Image: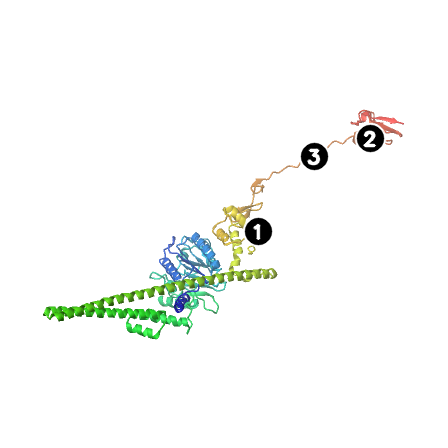
Amino acid sequence: MRAVGAIVLAVCSFWFFSQPALAEKRVALVIGNSAYKNVTRLQNPINDAAAVVSMFKRAGFDSIDAKLDLSIGDMRRALREFGNKTRDADVAVIYYAGHGIELDGTNYLVPIDATLETDTDVLDETFALDRVLFAVEPAKQLRLVILDACRDNPFAKKMKRTVGSRAIGRGLARVEPSSPNTMIAFAAKAGSTASDGDSKNSPFAKALVDHLTKPGLDLRKAFGFVRDDVLKATGNAQEPFVYGSLGGNDVTLVPAAPTPAAATPTDNDATMQRNYEFALQVGTKPVWDAFIEKYPSGFFTALAKAHRDKLAAEAARLDATNKAKAAQDEQTRLAVEGAKAAEQAKAAEQAKATERARVAAELAKKAQEEKVAEAERVKAAAMAKAVEQEAARVKAAEEAKAVAEAKAAAEKKAKEEKLAALAPPPDKSDQPAAVDLPRSIQAELRRVGCSTGAVDGNWNTAAQRALDLFNKHSGMKLDVKTASVDALDAVKAKPTRVCPLICDHGFKADGDRCTKITCRDGYQVNGDGTCEKIEVRKPITKREEPKAKPEQADRAKLDAAPAKPQTSGQIICNTGGCRPVGKGCHIDYGANTSSRGAAYLTEVCN
């Protein structure tokens, strides 16, 4: 039984190790846009998308999202959901078939509900290639974007130009990915167009399906084969092109099956199994004899002996059947010819003996067939058990690896946080395009009139206030504390101004600008921002008071004097006039001290 277990384990191990690596997570998003609402329908994108989806399924991808005929909202949702899946993926692939357009050197993918009446509509109704690259950015090992979008674009022919110097190119523009291990494949090189094809699939899609997921084939070589096939199919009119760079090691979408090591007991057992299967296909006694002679012992040898014995039993059964038939014929002949009774009795006895031999041969054949069937059942049970044990071993190994990776990741994170506390802030100039998310949101907030601050990529208090202002006027509840992809998509979705234009005193809103309010002569700007007539006030002439007579002036001074006894040397006035107070005298106010009227004053002397 130990030998049987070793053989079965070898067979199962060979099968397991011929499959793609289990630890590598691969995800794909496939988009096919055919049913355009404002231009002629494209025939092949949905067919090409279906072929590419089947290719990824055969390659054993962990997740494949197939999306057909997407509007701008559907494309935004698909990219957001796929971006969430790439966060823990090793390989991320996006395939897009449909219309694309180039504007001022930037490439855009066109949803089916786009109108693109003017060149500025491209910014509002399409998706920039940078947004697609942002969705595959988190993948750890490989980021691949395939664009079958280089067709002759009917939008560009009827589009109105708002700026005469703005360039709308033919095909797509050349790109240079900023992130490492990123490749962008065009169906036709920059500045040229691709053929939609005369058959069910475009030449580019057909070549992709033929070469891209061959096990162990490096991507650069695979796209080289794709290029050769497309050039041949289009008479050198269309040349696919790949942008980006990879390292020195081979990069594959489907890993190659490991080559079994030579001269090991497991390989000898696998060879024995293959020879057993060949012998089973032939199924003759000489072949089984040769197999048993080459492999005198082992699990498959026992099966071979059972098959050989089955053939021998069948041969014995046929021989016994023939002899019984011959004896019966002989008995019949003698009876017809009127032979002696003794000869007929002898022939009858011989016929009975041959019949017994035939029956015994039949029983022996059935016994051998049951023996072979039992041996096959034992083989199947042993292989199933070995498969189950191997699966349990692989699962345990994966769980142990996951625990080790989690532990290593935690240790690495702790170490990085410790180093980050000591290290100076990183230079943002060399960061990948993902760090420009705050800058992109600031630019969009300025476009919709919710920000007047600088577009510097610094998500500060001013930027947060601008996003909060956008929330109030758009009815949304975006998180203002962090710059997110959701915020960028929400602001970009607004084609016109959202926040009202606020102008200083003396200015008024004129479209997206504040212009100075000008009033005609005789009018001025009031607090409400409108013109009102200037009131001219005449100067008021003051009437001069008549000068008081000297006696009245002295009386007025006396009335204003404080209410206290006055001393000698002062003036006292009454109805008879005014005179100095005598020396050693003072003024007696009498009972009317509050009025201090000059007519009631009395001079009192010591």
What is the secondary structure assignment of the residue under circle 2? Answer: loop
- Looking at the picture, which amino acid does disc 2 mark? Lys
Residue hosting label 2: 564
Residue 568 image position (x, y, % from top left): 87, 31
Q: Nearer the viewer, mark 1 or mark 2?
A: 1
Asked which quadrant contains residue 569, the reply is top right
Q: Nearer the viewer, mark 3 or mark 2?
A: 2
Give the residue drawn at x 13%, y 70%: 342
In the picture, measured across the screen, residue 345 lies left or right of residue 474, that is left
Quarter of the image for the N terminus: give it: bottom left
- Looking at the picture, which amino acid does disc 3 mark? Lys
Residue hosting label 1: 462
Q: In whole angstroms, how far apart are the C-alphas of marks 3 and 2? A: 37 Å
In the picture, measured across the screen, residue 512 lies left or right of residue 110, that is right
| Label ID, residue 568 | none
Quarter of the image for the C terminus: give it: top right
Q: Looking at this view, is 50 or 507 the one in front?
A: 50
Residue 9 image position (x, y, % from top left): 40, 67
What is the crowding at mark 3: few (fewer than 14 residues within 10 Å), some, or many (at least 20)? Answer: few
Give the residue drawn at x 31%, y 69%: 306
Residue hosting label 3: 542
Q: Looking at this view, is 204 or 152 the one in front?
A: 204
Q: Earlier in the sequence, mark 1 or mark 2?
A: 1
Q: Earlier in the sequence, mark 3 or mark 2?
A: 3
Q: Nearer the viewer, mark 3 or mark 1?
A: 1
Residue 90 visible, this orientation: no
How is the model colour-coded?
rainbow
- Looking at the picture, which amino acid does disc 1 mark? Ala
Q: Looking at this view, is 122 or 324 the one in front?
A: 324
Q: In whole angstroms, how far apart are the C-alphas of marks 1 and 2? A: 71 Å
Q: Earlier in the sequence, mark 3 or mark 1?
A: 1
Q: Residue furthest front?
A: 342
